[in-house]
Image (cartoon, grey):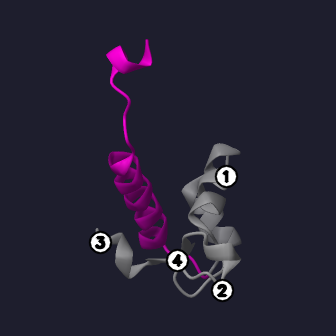
Amino acid sequence: MHYLERITIDSRIRSGKPCIRGTRITVSDVFDYLGGGMTIPEILDDFPDLTANDIQACFAFAADRDRRLNVVPHEAAL
């Protein structure tokens, strides 16, 4: 999945937080709902503008962001 087709960052929308294209729903909103115990079908029911592909794009975005984080080697952390 190429998340760039579904996730946008626009400084005029939600203070530049990554959002699902065409909505004001942020990637972090989706993860907050999931972390709060909602299932993907519940999120899709509550937000009819979202699709399963939008939620998958949130996962792909987060995975890509995680890969790009600088990791401090264990030795340097001592």
Query: What is the number of callouts on the image?
Result: 4
Image location (x, y in percent) of residue 3: 36, 71
Question: Mark 4 belongs to which amino acid?
Answer: Ile
Q: In the structure shown, which secondary structural element does the residue marked by tag 1 occupy?
A: helix
Residue range (magenta):
49-78
Splitting the image into 4 quarters, where does residue 43 fall?
bottom right
The mark nearer the N terminus, 1 or 4, is 4
Contact between labelled residues 2 and 3, with CB atoms less than 8 Å apart: no
Q: CA distance from mark 2 to mark 4?
A: 9 Å
Query: Which residue is found at the position 56% from the left and 63% from the top?
Result: 27
Contact, mark 1 vs mark 4 (Cβ under 8 Å)? no
Image coords of residue 65 (percent x, y): 40, 54
Residue 40, numbered circle: none
Q: Indicate which disc, 4 or 3, sits on the residue closer to the N terminus.
A: 3
Q: Which numbered disc flags the more N-terminal residue, 3 or 2?
A: 3
In the current view of this chain or complex, which residue is farthest to the top?
78
* Cα distance in 3D space between marks 4 and 3: 15 Å
Where does label 4 land, which residue? 9
Residue designated by label 1: 32
Q: Which residue is mark 3?
A: 2
Secondary structure beneath dot 4 equals loop
Residue located at (47% from left, 72% from top): 54
CA gap, disc 1 to disc 2?
22 Å
Kind of residue indicated by mark 3:
His
Main SS type for the magenta part? helix
Number of other residues with Cα within 10 Å of mark 3, as a class: few under 14, some 14 to 19, many 20 or more: few
- Quarter of the image with the C terminus is top left
> Is 68 one of the magenta-colored residues?
yes
Q: Which residue is mark 2?
A: 12
Frontmost residue, 75 versus 58: 75
